[in-house]
Image (cartoon, grey):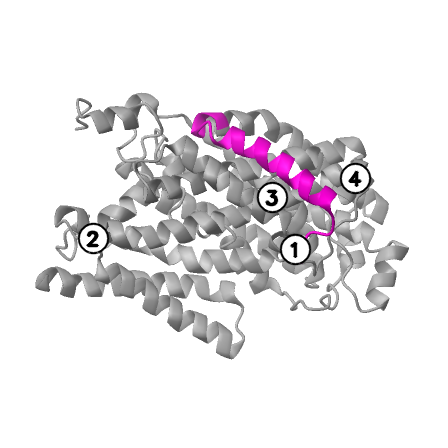
Amino acid sequence: MINIKNPSIKKSLNSEFERVPVPKKKHKTWRSFLGMYAGEHAAGTEFMIGPLFLTVGVSAFDLIVGLFFGNLFAVLSWRYLTANIAVKERLTLYFKLEKISGKKLVKFYNVANGILFCFLAGAMITVSATAVGVPTNIKMPTLNDVLPNSYTWILIVLVIGIITTLIASNGYSAVSRVSNWMSPIIIFAFFGCGLVAASQLGITSMSDLLSIWGSGSEPFPGQIKYGFWHVFFWSWFANAAMHIGMSDLSVFRYARSSTSGWTTAAGMYIGHYMAWIAASLLYAVYLKTPEAINSLEMGLAPEVAPGPLAYNALGWFGVFSVILAGWTTANPTIYRSGLAFQALIPKLSIKKATIIAGLISTIAGIFPAFAMKLLDFVSIYGFILAPFGAIIVFEFFFFKRFRLLKNYSEKNSISFNYAVFFAWFISFIFFYSISNFYDIFLSFLILPAWLFCGILFVLFSIFYQKNY
């Protein structure tokens, strides 16, 4: 029972319920989540990720089949883990983790999570900036660029970042409304881009696609070759921090039922399937231009700029769609980051915390490296954050079986739960070392690290709760 007579609780009930369960009257139907996930995942980064698959030389079969099954496993993770726990707890990830880990330890997570989400949102702002760059005729960033290449680029990013931040700072309802309004336009644009690009490539059937694309190509300079398992695990864990990492507890705590978790399929199969493939076809068209061929012959990676790619297919409507796509992805990402910062400083309002997150995201968007290295960055942020989700999942499913106390730190006034810290730290160091020393694709190790962290947490908790 929520004591709404408590002034601090009253304040939370009038904002975003950051430190209390979401009340029943605020629960939302599946339709609210459908628009958000379709918009968020059929969005700016899709224009970036699709072309990047071509830079790693993946074959048509490996991409099409690998994406299908990888996205299926992502949907199942959201439905049976994230949404299932969210509707029973009704808490943000940050407050739930604080109850388990303690206030001091959770600050480390909140800082890491908030900053990483800011970098991700920054990449989405970068994508929108490439579209605004079409009418201004600025030089686009290349695949290996790290720093901005002009003052005009910086100004464009600042304007887009400020607008995106203002929308996100108005809370989840505003984010949801914006996504619902924009997602049909963006989805139509991706579909149109795919059709136009297929026509330009002379593709009229699946056999045409397989014969033209074939077994892929050699990866671009500085990239590694992707096969089926690279695509499968990368697409499953592209949003690892959000599903098995439990970040979307903060979203699904508003859901009336855990079945709302199925709405993530709209994002996965419209965005992470259709849109990625459509965007990759756009880039395939560009790779046949003299400019791209010349770059490859010189041993250089051709530029990957979503704005010009979409303009080539759909004209100004394509440019407009890329701008909208960046907004709809950056909005909920900045909102999540704002929740992380607000949990770090509870006295800070969620609006102010989101504005801080938006400013950091905008600064990150100035640097194109976050977008150009998006495949690598997504793997890293999932690898760092996902194991924290295992802490929540293993507590939810196994603590009662082992007669362990849930929300241990809160109930015992502990500020630093060593069982949580060492479970995450050991799993991170162990599997990151394996990836580094044996040159193993990092996405292959996210699931083992997640499981290992959860198992260690249960074992350490058995010892910790008996002795402290």
List the residue tagged with mark 3: 124
Q: Classify mark 3: residues with Cα within 10 Å, few (<14), some (14-19) or many (20+).
A: many
Please give the label number shown on residue 134.
Answer: 4
Q: Nearer the viewer, mark 3 or mark 2?
A: 2
Q: Name the amino acid, label 2.
A: Ser
The image quadrant that residue 178 belongs to is: top right
Which three-letter amino acid code belongs to the residue tagged 4? Val
Amino acid type of the residue tagged 3 in the rendering: Met
Residue in the picture at 57% in, 63% down: 230
Rendering quarter of residue 132: top right
Magenta stretch prevailing secondary structure: helix
State whether residue 157 is above or below residue 222.
above
The residue pinned by badge 1 equals 372
Range of magenta residues? 146-174
Secondary structure beneath label 2: loop
Q: CA distance from mark 2 to mark 4?
A: 51 Å
Of 266 and 119, nearer the camera is 119
Would you name the residue on which mark 2 appears? 415
Circle 1 residues within 10 Å: few <14, some 14–19, many ≥20: many
Distance from Cα at disc 3 to Cα at disc 1: 11 Å
